[in-house]
Amino acid sequence: DEAYIGEHHSAGWETIGSPEVFMATAAERTRRIKLGTGVISLPYHHPYMVAHRMVLLDHLTRGRVILGVGPGALASDALMFGIDPERQREMMDESLGVICRLFESTDPLTVKSDWFELNEAVLQLRPYQQPSIPVAVASVQSPAGVVVAGKHGAGVLSLSIPRDTVRQTSLQELWSIGEETAEKHGKALRREDWSLVVSVHIAESRKEAMDDIRVGSARELTEYFGGTLGHPTPPVPQDQIADFMVERNQWFVGTPDDCIAGIERLQEMSGGFGGFMIRVSDWATRERTLHSYELFARYVMPRFQGSLAGIHVSNQWASLRKEALQANRIAGLKRADESYYGERK
């Protein structure tokens, strides 16, 4: 299992400014779950500092960290820091190349960029995970994320399914772009390192699930994404937004079976991926949100982890033979009765 924590500095809704600090706190309270930055906005930081903090966390957690990176999601963050939004993706690419070299080599590294500089730099601590800390690149609104992932042989976090702002790029197309880029740079992408992120809420019935999130989900889309960030919002009344998004398979809201069907659709659309992640949205009450997670863990996860495969096969095997098995059972009971009462005579 994995949990990713993001980085945001403005706009008043997402208020965690340092995923590394949050992860250090979470690591102290957990033992097995992997913790990832979801994501560090690389243009906001000197790449050496990112690498150094992550290696320290790697040791503190005994190898439970993943470095998730992106260019920066909020234009308001970039404005505050004086960063040109048109340069953020190339800055991310340049920074990630330096970070990977620091993770993988002890050769002194000298780099002079127009926004950072390194002079014979070496990390004092080596990654706890060998040969390196796992890296994943966010892919949200354009193929830029999978291109960078392919160039560096990193994993992919698909945070938007399957749209971009210019054209409708399918999941299979995005993966093909990443594979082509990886081949050009002598790298390889692995589908098991590709995670899809979807907003999910489940309950015992579709009506319960929709009632749980109808108000909170509409508020986030209209007040945050629309009213604060200026993103387009669904062309329907606010009380119909949840229905609109579910009907278009952008959100999975319903029963565990509905969620299973949604994930199976994504498997078909993508050609296969390695991880499915739930975007934490706080649309419902804490009680109903935790209940949704419990239903997901109890009924959805086992379906895709293979943990019920043996149980299903055994059940089918017994069901196909139930007449013969019952006949054998009755014959055994009859023989036992005859043996007991025969001896008494």
Image (tube, rainbow, N blue to C red):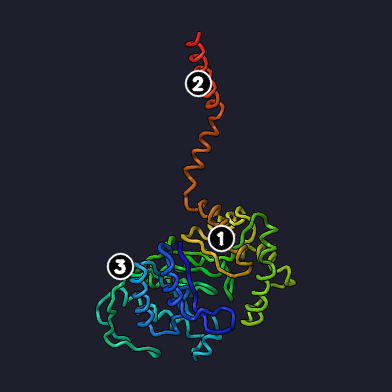
Q: Is residue 115 or residue 57 the one in the foreground?
A: 57
Pick whichever of labels 3 and 1 is earlier in the sequence: 3
Above or below residue 253? Residue 313 is: above
Q: On the image, numbered disc 2 is attached to which residue?
A: 332
Residue at point 73%, 68% (across, down): 240
CA gap between label 3 and label 1 equals 33 Å
Residue at point 28%, 88% (across, down): 119
At label 1, the amino acid type is Tyr
Residue at point 56%, 60% (across, down): 293
The mark lying in front, picked from 3 and 1, is 1
The mark lying in front, picked from 3 and 2, is 2
How crowded pointer 1 is (Cα within 10 Å; few <14, some 14-19, many 20+) is rated as: some
Pick whichever of labels 3 and 2 is earlier in the sequence: 3
Pick whichever of labels 2 and 1 is earlier in the sequence: 1
The answer to whether mark 3 and mark 1 are in CB contact below 8 A is: no
At label 2, the amino acid type is Gly
CA gap between label 2 and label 1 equals 46 Å
At label 3, the amino acid type is Pro
Above or below residue 345? Residue 222 is: below
Find residue 25 and report its horizontal and vertical position in percent.
44, 73
Q: Which mark is residue 293?
A: 1
Q: Is residue 47 left or right of residue 227?
A: left
Q: Secondary structure at mark 1?
A: helix
Above or below residue 341? Residue 199 is: below
Residue at point 70%, 64% (across, down): 243
Q: On the image, numbered disc 3 is attached to which residue?
A: 131
Q: Secondary structure at mark 2?
A: helix
